[in-house]
């Protein structure tokens, strides 16, 4: 996509619609970003890794005047209706569905669709995020209702090998728009000990595990961002022991501490295979 001048920032309000535009994901871009994650891009063949559309939806909002600075992902719905193809031009249709005042700031719900040339949805990206009030960061006040954890004990999962994040890799993956992912000062102002990875970056590890198993033609998933994942942590990917059946549970597990904690959970509600 060609670079565009930064628009004037708009206050998020229900019913706000994103500007019409088209986007595509190139082979070179996918290779660069997945390699920054330590993942092998060839697993996806000519498909676009659907995890990219989490960040692409946020970037579409930024170009329409909705700032993402300091925002924190909470919940993400991701549906792949059709397999997105590298280089395919997709139209973006986005809307803010709701904005609610919560003790820590604004809880914002958005729906962004990526449409093929015939108008069909290829990807749906539904998101709930927190736009924090910086004065409330240190108080640890609430951000609204959060669904219960999917996984009560990491021992429920079959665990993969260790992957190690580095500040350089996280910076290489991150794009402009939310400096808590690549600037230590911004992360500190937001109440974090170090920069945290973006939600989409964490989801790449989960989608990569799916495509490593088999290529899906459809999936519908709910993703929950439970804890921040810092740019210097070690991770493991866990999958429920009955893998890739109805309601498969997956997780990005923070492996840096003796007591392993879940950073990101995904409930794969439905999947269809090639």
Image (cartoon, rainbow, N blue to C red):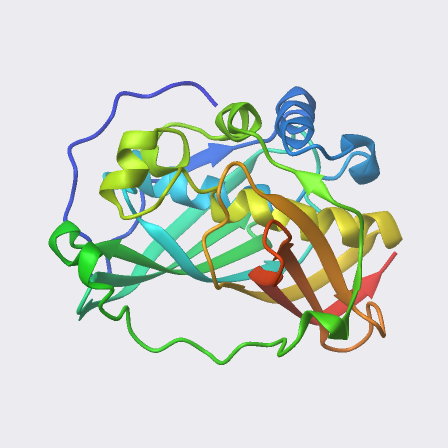
Q: Nearer the viewer, residue 44 or 195?
A: 195
Q: Nearer the viewer, residue 184 or 220?
A: 184
Residue 145 image-quadrant placement: bottom left
- Report if residue 193 is visible in the image: yes
Vertical order, 77 against 2 (above or below): below
Residue 166 percent across, percent down from the top left: 57, 30
Q: Nearer the viewer, residue 119 or 231?
A: 231
Residue 58 percent across, percent down from the top left: 40, 44
Residue 155 percent across, percent down from the top left: 74, 72
Q: Is residue 189 left or right of residue 2?
A: left
Q: Is residue 30 left or right of residue 135?
A: right
Residue 208 percent across, percent down from the top left: 74, 46
Q: Is residue 254 left or right of residue 86?
A: left
- Report if residue 118 is visible in the image: no
Instruction: Tell me the quarter of the image containing the C terminus.
Output: bottom right
Residue closest to the far front = 258
Residue at the image point whose x is 60% and y is 50% from the top: 203
Residue at the image point whose x is 44% and y is 45% from the top: 57
């Amino acid at each position: 996509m060609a670079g565009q001048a930064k628009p004037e920032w708009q206050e998020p309000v229900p019913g706000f619609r994103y500007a019409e535009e088209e986007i595509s994901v190139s082979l070179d871009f996918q290779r660069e970003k997945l390699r920054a994650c330590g993942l092998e891009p060839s697993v996806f063949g000519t498909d676009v890794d659907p995890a990219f559309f989490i960040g692409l939806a946020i970037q579409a909002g930024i170009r329409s005047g909705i700032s993402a600075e300091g925002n924190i992902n909470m919940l993400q719905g991701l549906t792949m209706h059709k397999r997105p193809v590298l280089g395919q031009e997709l139209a973006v249709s986005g809307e803010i569905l709701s904005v609610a005042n919560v003790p820590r700031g604004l809880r914002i719900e958005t729906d962004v669709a990526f449409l093929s040339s015939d108008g069909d949805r290829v990807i749906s990206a539904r998101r709930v995020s927190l736009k924090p009030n910086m004065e409330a960061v240190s108080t640890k006040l609430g951000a609204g209702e959060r669904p219960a954890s999917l996984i009560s004990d990491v021992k429920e999962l079959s665990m993969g090998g260790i992957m190690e994040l580095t500040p350089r890799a996280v910076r290489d993956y991150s794009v402009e728009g939310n400096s808590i992912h690549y600037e230590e000062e911004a992360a500190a102002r937001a109440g974090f000990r170090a920069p945290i990875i973006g939600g989409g970056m964490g989801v790449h590890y989960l989608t990569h595990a799916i495509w490593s198993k088999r290529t899906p033609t459809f999936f519908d998933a709910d993703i929950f961002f439970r804890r921040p994942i810092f740019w210097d942590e070690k991770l493991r990917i866990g999958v429920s022991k009955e893998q890739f059946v109805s309601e498969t549970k997956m997780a990005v597990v923070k492996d840096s501490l003796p007591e392993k904690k879940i950073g990101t959970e995904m409930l794969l509600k439905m999947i269809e295979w090639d």
